[in-house]
Amino acid sequence: MRKVYLLLTLLTCVTLLNSCKSLEESTFQSDYQMGTLLPRLTCWIDQPSFENAYGANSWSAKPSYDIEHPYGYTETPYGKGVYEINEHTKLYTADKRIQDASQIFVYDVTHNITDPTTRRMGNILVRAGGIYNKNNYKWSWLSGFTLGIFNAMGMPMCSNRVEIEIIVEIYDLRDNLVARFSERGTAKYPMAAYHGYYQFQRKTADMAMQDAMIKIKELINRDYDMIMSKLR
């Protein structure tokens, strides 16, 4: 019995240490590129919409911090709490999923939607709509029966399913709305003990964001000629 207790203690320690690991860099880097890229667009995010979607309630009127804009930003025509973002932006938020959304969006726009070497011709903004988030605990009975030993070895404890609406708006240099796209991204991800509860929910949310952005890129690609005619 003593050996079993020591084994469980050791597995618990390993689990807790591993649950702190960060997400892979590939989580934020989609490899799905549009067939023809748009001209350079400045990225913006509606932070309160993501706070509402994730139930974070940590947003404040404080501007986001950026090493290139250390004093923040003025109010924008796109609404309160909508900020310009780039790869250096750190949002004032307690929820890492919202910072992740910023990184995913900036990477996608910079590498897969626009050509950053061209002349800037407008702005592109991301907002979050409704969200569906549910955990499936079908493995929990087996986890309890085996005292969590198999979970520490990689057996799922539960799975998380996320469906989120992502809205992307494109504006010209005079802040006229050029195009608006809305798609729902879905993802399902199993949680093993070494993931940590919040980390696996974060991973699922990021995957759902990626899925929505792939669908939106397909729509932008479809309407490329119309978008270009309005940006010029």
Image (cartoon, rainbow, N blue to C red):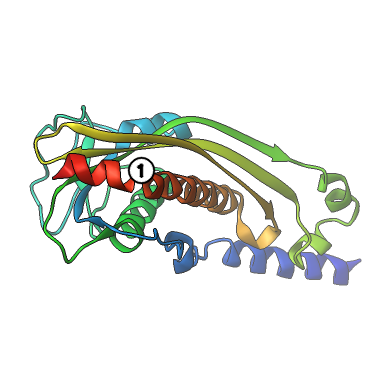
Q: Residue 15 lies in what quarter of the image?
A: bottom right
Q: Residue 132 lies in what quarter of the image?
A: top right
Quadrant containing the N terminus in the rendered view: bottom right
Q: Position of residue 58 (x, y in %)?
A: 35, 34
Please determine whether, in this image, residue 13 is positioned above or below residue 178. Answer: below
User: Is 13 situated left or right of 125 in this image?
Assistant: right
Q: Position of residue 197 (x, y in %)?
A: 61, 49
Q: Residue 138 lies in what quarter of the image?
A: top right
Q: Is residue 69 visible?
A: yes
The foreground one among 205 and 200 is 205
The foreground one among 135 and 5 is 135
User: Is 170 situated left or right of 3 in this image?
Assistant: left
Please determine whether, in this image, residue 226 is positioned above or below residue 131. Answer: below
Identity, as a three-letter code, of the amino acid under mark 1: Asp
Label 1: which residue?
223
The foreground one among 55 and 185 is 185
How crowded pointer 1 is (Cα within 10 Å; few <14, some 14-19, many 20+) is rated as few
Q: Position of residue 80 (x, y in %)?
A: 21, 27
Q: Is residue 92 visible?
A: no
